[in-house]
Image (tube, rainbow, N blue to C red):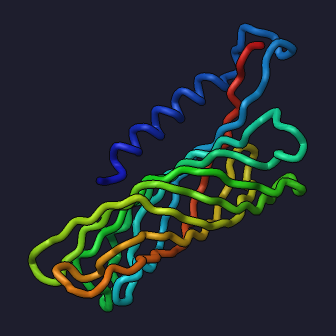
């Protein structure tokens, strides 16, 4: 699994959102509601939790803050992420051919007391896939994973924001070394993502 399929999905979403939020709207403002959506891309550095070292790669994400909610649910939203880390392997990384990618979604909560600075937390479930091996042979393993994390969004220009994100993942029942007789353990990759995103406002008549 690679990020290419998700890249097409995100680009399509960006195109649709840009068209929907264009200035030429036939319905008057009084008959429309605004629905927020944000899409972004970032650079990730992760500790894959094998035998040391780090991996680099890219992340795509889409955020949908839930609008028109009761006051006690203000700040909650839906988030989807896709990440592929396979580059910049450190010399100490074992196995040498390790790669990890994930597709996950869940909820986040953003504190919005300040107009230009929004800290947030997130809780995700998804699908994780990894290739690895200690020799020329490659092994593939996939499973359902969970993740927790948080970070902040900071507005730099109108609808353009930067994001700093930390994530800690849970890969259950995982053998770090194939063909081993040792009990399976839990893999816990963790890392940071730095990137930028664009905020849209989708209009819908009511």
- Of residues 202 and 50, the one nearer the viewer is 50
Question: What residue is rendered at 86% in x and 52% in y?
Answer: 115
Q: Is residue 30 above or below residue 58?
A: above
Q: Is residue 89 above or below residue 92?
A: above
Quarter of the rendering containing residue 83: bottom left
Residue 61 image offset from top left, x and y in percent: 54, 50
Q: Is residue 141 above or below residue 202?
A: below
Determine the residue located farthest toward the left in the rendered image: 136
Residue 115 horizontal side relative to residue 56, left or right: right
Residue 198 horizontal side relative to residue 103, left or right: right
Split into 4 quadrants, where in the image is the C terminus?
Answer: top right
Residue 173 image offset from top left, x and y in percent: 36, 73
Question: What residue is rendered at 57% in x and 60% in y?
Answer: 195
Residue 17 image offset from top left, x and y in percent: 59, 29
Question: What residue is rendered at 76% in x and 55% in y?
Answer: 110
- Of residues 189 and 163, the one nearer the viewer is 189
- Of residues 53 and 148, the one nearer the viewer is 148
Question: What residue is rendered at 55% in x and 67% in y?
Answer: 193
- Of residues 109 and 89, the one nearer the viewer is 109
């Amino acid at each position: 699994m690679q990020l290419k399929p998700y890249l097409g999905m995100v680009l399509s979403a960006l195109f649709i959102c840009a068209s929907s939020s264009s200035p030429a709207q036939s319905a008057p403002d009084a008959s429309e509601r605004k629905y927020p959506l944000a899409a972004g891309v970032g650079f990730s550095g992760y500790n894959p939790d094998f035998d040391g070292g780090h991996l680099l790669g890219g992340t795509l994400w889409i955020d949908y803050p839930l609008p028109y909610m009761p006051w006690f649910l203000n700040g909650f939203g839906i988030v989807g992420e896709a990440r592929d880390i396979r580059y910049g392997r450190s010399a100490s990384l074992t196995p040498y051919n390790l790669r990890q990618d994930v597709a996950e979604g869940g909820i986040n909560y953003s504190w919005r007391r300040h107009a230009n600075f929004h800290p947030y937390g997130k809780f995700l479930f998804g699908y994780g896939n990894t290739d690895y091996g200690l020799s020329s042979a490659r092994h593939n393993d996939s499973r359902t994973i969970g993740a927790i994390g948080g970070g902040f969004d900071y507005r730099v220009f109108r609808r353009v924001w930067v994001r700093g994100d930390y994530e800690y993942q849970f890969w259950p029942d995982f053998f770090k070394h194939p063909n081993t007789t040792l009990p399976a353990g839990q893999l816990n990759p963790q890392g940071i993502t730095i990137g930028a995103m664009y905020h849209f406002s989708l209009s819908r008549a009511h």
